[in-house]
Image (spheres, coloured by chain):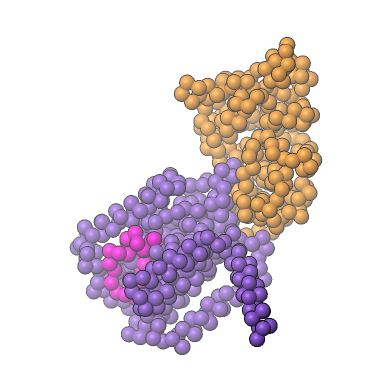
Chain colours: A purple, B orange
Amino acid sequence: MTGLPLHAPPLWRQVLPYVALLGLALLIYFVFPDQLPMAARIAALAIFVMSLDLVVGYGGLATLGHSAMYGVGAYAAGLLAMHLTGNPLLGLLAGACAGALLAFLSGLFLLRYEGLTFLMLTIAISQIAQNLASKLRTWTGGEDGLSGFAIGKILGLASFDLQGRVAFVYCFAAMFICLWLMRRLMASPFGLACVGIHQNRQRMAALGTRIRWQLLKLYTIAGAFAGISGALAAQVAQIVGLDTLGFELSAEALVMLVLGGAGNLWGALAGTVIFASIHHWASTLNPYHWLFIIGGMLVTVVLVPRERWGQALARRMQVFRRAAAPAGGSS
Amino acid sequence: MSELLLETRQLHKSFGGLHVTRDVNLRLQAGDKVGLIGPNGAGKTTLINLITGVLTPSAGSVRLAGEDVSALSQAQRVKRGLVRTFQITQLAPTLPVRLQVEMAIHEREGSIGRLWRPLGSYSAVQDEAQAILQSLRMDALAARAPVELAYGEQRLVEIALAMALRPRVLLLDEPMAGVPTGERQVVLDALASLPSGLAILMIEHDMDLVFHFADRMMVLAEGAVLAEGSPAEIRRHPAVRAAYLGEEG
């Protein structure tokens, strides 16, 4: 569906999911302190998947090159910390600018195309970015990655600690703000236009919409958020590798988005948490076959429409009750 | 004399050796209701695509209120008041109807690209969208998405979107196409309620409707204008009867 209701829901319903998210963060912080480093990585990654949702879920642009913006954001934050300042917020700003700039420049070319051609060209852009990063060893560290930079105190208050507490609070706060910002942006007339373009380009053209311009805006905004995500990851890990620009990251993010559901941003967040949690737990249990679980879930999500999940569950429960009833009667 | 709103001069379109529109001259003044008929493949929809800028003409020009708009994009022509509907309904399938009308109003007002203000805060736009839907007796459908609507109702949404753009020239491409008999009256009522100052060009295969609706007719055959005149003249025109209505002269 669209993620755009006809009537704005009451304030409490708008605020409730954010409160629940805050509650979840507090739970993780106090009850699962040993999981904080992983939770911080998930929060940073969630921004990336949500930014992908802007492009895929709202704009209807199937891309496998979104990691290019994530990667340049990561390198920008790393280089800034190495050569100019370790201020983490300036690092996020640098990541956002780098991601937005790459998205804008590549979007000028990419958005002339649609469908499979667009998809293939996005992969090409990320491959070019990855190869460039590999060649520019002096700046990027090449295959060894960019490392040796230090990140300063966040807001001059706290440095990253070994337990990952500060990193978690920092990443979660950034994710929380980005989620709110993205949802706010997409609840505007611009968001409505993006959904319209996604659903029927011909109609939007007949309304007089400058389709390519609106999509370029969307792509640039998404690039900025992807850059923030990359910058966050770089600051927390304090190393940036070539894999941040790679195709695999884009593909995994797309899987996360499909798992959670595209087009409302909350799904992107849920998909990231589900994927990363399964990755973490299942790969511990079985490092070779954990992807089967993800594969099975993907098949289920794709084959069973979201609105039928409730119905399907109710039917199963009914069958289960019927099967249980005679057994109960005979005993 | 009414203002000349739409004019095509020697409009021609060919795909390779295939000439689909041949030197069509068309003039629409404010308040005109022109019916465009012709057999399948006569080039009627191509003509609309040329006028609206979806297709680029091979030769000739399109003028809107005296301005040559031949080099302008479809979006720029819409901004100047040239609006169309589609032969096959083109809507955003899962967006509530009122949001689609609001989208058209935002587009007209130039606020469609605004990033920050939430949709819900544009109360004037919401009121106008509701008023348009009310005028077409569609207010009960405001919260529903086109996928949930009957085909006739979807045609009404197309007309509502066109009205939201406040056109000066409206090109209706077969508004009755695919509408079941039971739903025809609602579309007919909507067409009857269109503002009188609007210049309308209607393509339609339903002869009763188009002869009743239009005050001037144009017949297209093999991309060229075969005949032009009042509905009564067209009914009597021997070439039209032979070529289009299937009667011997």
* Camera sees residue A110: yes
In the displayed structure image, the side of residue A3 where residue B31 appears, left or right: right
On the image, the x and y values in percent for residue B247 come to 73, 16
The answer to whether residue A87 is seen in the rendering is no
What is the x, y in percent for residue B105? 65, 49
Instruction: Say which quarter of the image contains residue A319.
Output: bottom right
In the rendered image, residue B198, in percent from the top left (x then y), is placed at 72, 35
Viewer-proximal residue, B76 or A49?
A49
| Residue at image location 50% in from the left, 71% down from the top | A270
> In the rendered view, does A224 fall on the left or right side of B157?
left
Assign the N terminus of chain B to one quadrant of the image: top right
Seen from the viewer's position, the closer of residues A9 and B173 is B173
The stretch drawn in magenta includes residue A244: yes
In this view of the protein, which residue sits in the foreground, B26 or B178? Answer: B178
The x, y position of residue A302, in whole percent, is 51, 60
* Quarter of the picture holding the C terminus of chain B: top right
Is residue A293 part of the magenta span, yes or no?
Answer: no
Q: Residue furthest front?
A: A330
Q: Is residue A307 above or below residue B182?
A: below
Position of A181 with respect to B243 (left or right) is left
Residue drawn at x 33%, y 51% as measured from the top left: A124
Which residue is painted at 43% across and 80% down in the image? Answer: A169
Q: Which residues are magenta?
A: A225-251
Residue depicted at 59% across the width and 42% down the height = A206
| Residue A27 located left or right of residue B166 | left
Vertical arrangement, residue A160 with respect to residue B99, above or below: below
